[in-house]
Amino acid sequence: MTADWPILSIVIWLPILGGALVLGSGDRAPNVSRWLALSVAILTFLLSIPLYTGFDVGTAQMQFVENSPWIPAFDINYHLGVDGISMPLILLTTFVTILVIIAGWEVIQYRPSQYMAAFLIMEGVMVGVFAALDAMLFYVFWEAMLIPMFIIIGIWGGPRRVYATIKFFLYTFLGSVFMLVALVYMYFKSGSMEILAFHDLKLGMTEQVLIFLAFLLAFAVKVPMWPVHTWLPDAHVEAPTGGSVILAAIMLKIGGYGFLRFSLPITPDASQTLDWLIIAMSLIAVVYIGFVALVQQDMKKLIAYSSIAHMGFVTLGFFIAFRIFANPAVDSGAVLGVQGGMVQMVSHGFISAAMFLCVGVLYDRLHSRQISDYGGVVNVMPWFAAFMVFFAMANAGLPGTSGFVGEFMVILASFRADFWFAVLAATTLILGAAYTLWMVKRVVFGAVTSERVAALQDINAREAIVLTSLALAVLALGLWPAPLIDVMDASIGNLVQHIGVSKL
Amino acid sequence: MQYDLTSLQPVLPEIFLLGAACVVLIVDLFLSERTRIYSYGLTLFSLVGAIALVLWAAGPEKQVLFDGSYVRDPVSDVLKVAILGVNILAMAYGRGYLLGQGIYRGEYFILTLFATLGMLIMASAGNFLVLYLGLELLALSMYALVAFDRDSLKGAEAAMKYFVLGALASGMLLYGISMLYGATGALAFPEVAEAVASGHVDETVLVFGLVFVVIGVAFKFGAVPFHMWVPDVYHGAPTAVTLLLGSAPKVAAFALALRLLVDGAAPLAAHWSDMLTILAVLSLALGNIVAIAQHNLKRMLAYSTISHVGFIFLGFIAANDNGYGAALFYTVVYALTAAGGFGLLALLSRRGFDAENLHDLKGLNERSPWLAGMMLLILFSMAGVPPTVGFFAKLFVLEAVVNVDKVWLAVVAVFFSVIGAYYYLRAVKMMYFDKPIDDQGIVATLDGRIAFSVNGLAILLLGIFPAGLLQLCRAAFAG
């Protein structure tokens, strides 16, 4: 259904143009640029709410569609639209950006206008990735994300920021360019740049495998999957708090979204043949990376590895559908797996954002992320401790928080496919609790270990607003996930039905 | 033929430019350094006037004049406007630089006008001789410009290298042309193509001549293995001249390749396409890899030029209108970005200081956020990252190559462009993440800054709306 007013274009271009305005406002009056950035972010979020309220849950068709020619010579159109898969992710993006801007309020003293502008421009571009229905438009937005992130990590990051940001850029760039070649190839095969046309394009097995591998390179690096995950710990640790939040909450989801929008529907047979590869990589991520997280001394690195493990759940959920198709005795569970992966994506968006913000709160005070420098924080910062323990529980997958819902659905789906997949996947319940709660125990609980910790101030109003919003989101999604699942249901059902049909 | 307006109108840009060069030559004799602004103004005026004349005569039909020596077709219109436009930017960048370095002489403007004239002649060449004439006019002017700074040892070395190697390459080109002429008996391109297509000519002789012609073309572009002059000449020449050398002459080299290989030898496309494939892959590889080792920004951009030439060749390898249009788009975009890249170095230089190293970019975001932002756009355009126009240039060339089922070539090209991204990132890193080592302010002239801003913004705007320029480039070949 076509929109009455171009809501998607507004949600994309308002932050981009607003960001340019903030950039122009300069640093002579930093509070002006901060308030301007905050207003633009809040306005964008408010303008994205109609995407949810006006969404038709009964259909898997693209909604709020906008289509105009862009580069007619190559049939590239400015084609936007959302369905049940992309709409929640867009709302996640607009919501988290507000929190990031509030979080960077006092901390960022060097050129705050450039900082705020970079996040706003990135917000617009990320919404563009989710909303794009034309392959080249998608690719343009996908790559354009890299520039502001590169700048953010490189200017406002930690001591090894240059290494981390160049690694991040080159790693993701390398993965993406092969996807470009695959998209161009499919354009010539199908005569159209429409992603939905690619879904219906008939491809031979060799072609499918090559295209699947090209997409895999791009998305596996973004998600990130083991073994191409090594850029993430560096990027997360060295990025400023806001950068880590956006990286973890949104950018990783773009990789998962890519699997759902491209790999699964375009190359279902190759996905079926190579499902063992993805499932193996996902399970290794869940188990092995879980153990790696256990031994970390740096809090941010621990949460970074925990992110990789949680995203392993996401990719597991997506590809378990093929195992279920392959097993003739089982007739349901595929939808459950994909839904679980999607819910896990949204939930992880909130939880990881919250965890990084908590670490950011501590870092702003003590300028250290080492677990050994903390201890007994609960005695001096009780409110903060409450939030941190709550988010840690959510990260561990406590029922009642959103972390549980996605993991439970994926484990159930894995059980339908193979008992041992479920067992390995379920070890995350143990490992996740282990590394998160052990970190919380060492940092938050116990006696106060040093004078510096004793001098800590509890969270102020600004930090409280941010953490409360996230806590409410986590709790709401955990207790009542139905609104999210209902929105996604039709689209995921349609997707699963599509990938169940062979293209050969 | 009739010497009336209809037959002279298409040639007016060249006539006007020649006249203007002579006028500037005389006028400059009576000017001192303080009043040299008049030469500058006259040069700018003549370039703008030439653009106006090109546009006045422009149209979708092809006109052949002077017994087949001069061709005015839509491709030549696009090429000429691109050459003249980029040279306007180059003049704006160059003036401030020359003032600061104490080599602000009128010969710069005069030689530029002659070089431009040579380039325009190359764009409109209808036979081998006129093409060679334009090429030599360009080359000789450039040799003199490279040696512009008399007191520079590097400059003298660069000029000698350029001259000797250039003369050798021109000789090779001429040898190849003589073979083709000897085999086909014709000088004018349409007749040559006809003779080749007829099949009455011995193919061995044709391919033999073609090899030498491709060598000549490859030298002008700076493709591997005929690239050795590029880093040394770019490094040794004064930045204002490197700027001139690295931008518009690439468009002229495109014209050279187009007229020789496509207009003249299109039936032999299978042969020269294979030759260019080898050159392209080597250029992509060597240009991108060796650029990583460079600390001098001019040398780094020189090696990056070599890699971009590899991409331009990809468009030719496709050997169809799609590919030529894509290669033209890439060349025009590249000339724009190269002008900007070297232009920043010219802007950062001042009296007693010649900015040419990577570390001179350090902390540019602190010294001038606007200049750093424009350079960010230019660097990412060279790397091929959206939303800059450089991405679309690469995309269209890749599409042309995939269209003729050479997907392996596209994969190789993107792989090396990722390797290449590293040195562009390093330059961005210097600008944004490092503290400045130069504590003095930037004394760039106003017209230089305006030109740079126009340059950077054009790259962003063309990146968001590439359809117009693409349509222009494709339409040039469609007729």
Image: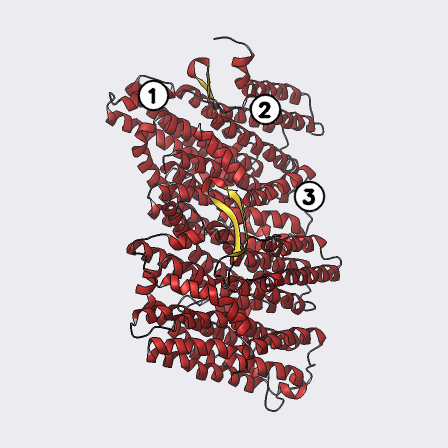
What secondary structure is found at the residue carrying circle 1? helix
What secondary structure is found at the residue carrying circle 3? loop
Mark linked to residue B50? 2
Look at label 3 and name its amino acid. Val
- Give the mark nearest the N terminus, 3 or 1: 1
Determine which residue is flagged by label 1.
B192
> Same chain for the residues at labels 3 and 2, yes or no?
yes
- Give the mark nearest the N terminus, 3 or 2: 2
Chain under callout 1: B
Q: Residue at x 66, y 41 (%)?
A: B449
State left or right for residue B448 relative to residue A188. right
Q: Nearer the viewer, residue A376 or A72?
A: A72
- Give the mark nearest the N terminus, 2 or 1: 2
Determine which residue is flagged by label 3.
B443
Chain under callout 2: B
State left or right for residue B207 relative to residue B229. left
Q: Residue furthest front?
A: A58
Chain under callout 3: B
Q: Residue at x 41, y 82 (%)?
A: A427
Quadrant placement of the N terminus of chain A: bottom right
Look at label 2 and name its amino acid. Ala
Q: Are marks 3 and 1 in contact (CB under 8 Å)?
A: no
Mark 3 vs mark 1, foreground winner is 1
Mark linked to residue A341? none
Q: Residue at x 33, y 26 (%)?
A: B176
> Same chain for the residues at labels 3 and 1, yes or no?
yes
Q: Nearer the viewer, residue B144 or A193?
A: A193
Mark 3 vs mark 2, foreground winner is 2
